[in-house]
Image (tube, grey):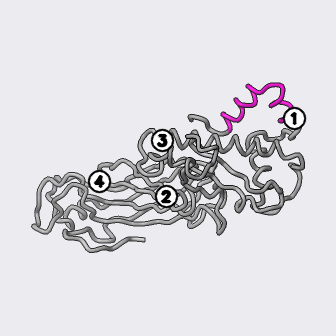
Amino acid sequence: MVTKYAASHLQVSADAVKLDRFSVVVADRDHLNPDFVPDWDYFTDLRVSVDVDVDLGRCINDSGLRYDSILGVSVTWHATGSGLRGASDVLDVVGGQNSIQLDLPGAMLGGQLVLDVFLTAKFPQGFANPLAARRPGSILWTDRRTVRLEGDGSRFPMSPISFKESGIAGGLTAAWALIFDSTELYDSGLGSTRLYLNTDHPKVEALLNAPDVESETIARVLHADVNRAMVLQALGSEDLELEEDYPGESLGELLVLAMNRNFPDVSVEQVRAMLATRPGEFEAVIQARGGFLL
């Protein structure tokens, strides 16, 4: 949806820029112009691809900028479930198609993914019109797309909390903890499982409030660690049956999905035996399946 807002400078006509193609790739499945991505979870990274068709000459003329000004195109993202946000690089605009890709770690997402596409005056070189934008980065056009990643229930809701104040993990400076309030396989897995992020930990605080280059690595470690915790929970459940048809979004279904994702076509007993007799190999498989540091 093209967004209109009050501006103190000239903007470009709505039909001078077109969001030509918008897709979200999840587990090698390409969803074109999606409102909802049904096969996403916190273990699954996303790739967002945006193609913007720009009539460059018309945009320069509409904006009142001098002919040699450089325009920029970029995409920002905001995940409502985690509160995290980020942005692509600002690319120099060319006439015709301009393509942007964003790779987003699943552990940083949740709720709805809000994507804003911006056309900006990246480097205004002069002004053919006194009402032209004068500041680099001034917005000339924007379009917003919203993609729902989760259903009405929250998959692994995340709660920032002080471990010291709450007493989680004895108040130690752990980075996070995946807590299962119930071990009943037919109970709601979404309602009884919560990921607590320790706001006392400096790396977590940065991840939540000021994501930087290192935060992406932290998010991937979190992704892999939650994956490992799910497998260990599955192995500790004596009643878990991989062939059982558990209710949708129940704890049993989530644990079966975790086992099948990490150890496809392997029985629970075989995985338990691997953990007991070849723990190093078990950990290596978990690292590979969870995308540790990848």
Q: Are marks 4 and 2 in contact (CB under 8 Å)?
A: no
Q: Amino acid at mark 2?
A: Gly
Q: Nearer the viewer, residue 134 or 283?
A: 283
Closer to the observer: label 4 or label 1? 1
Precedes in sequence: disc 4 or disc 1: 4
User: Residue, x 51% and y 49% (percent of image)?
Assistant: 199
Closer to the observer: label 4 or label 2? 2
Tag on residue 203? 3
Q: Position of residue 30 (x, y in %)?
A: 59, 54
Q: Nearer the viewer, residue 233 or 270?
A: 233
Q: Which residue is mark 2?
A: 83
Query: Of helix, strand and loop, which mostly describes the magenta segment?
Result: helix
Crowd rating for badge 4 (residues with CA inside 10 Å; few <14, some 14–19, many 20+): many
Boundaries of the magenta span: 271-289
Rounded to the nearest angstrom, the CA distance separating label 3 from label 2 is 16 Å
Rounded to the nearest angstrom, the CA distance separating label 4 from label 2 is 26 Å
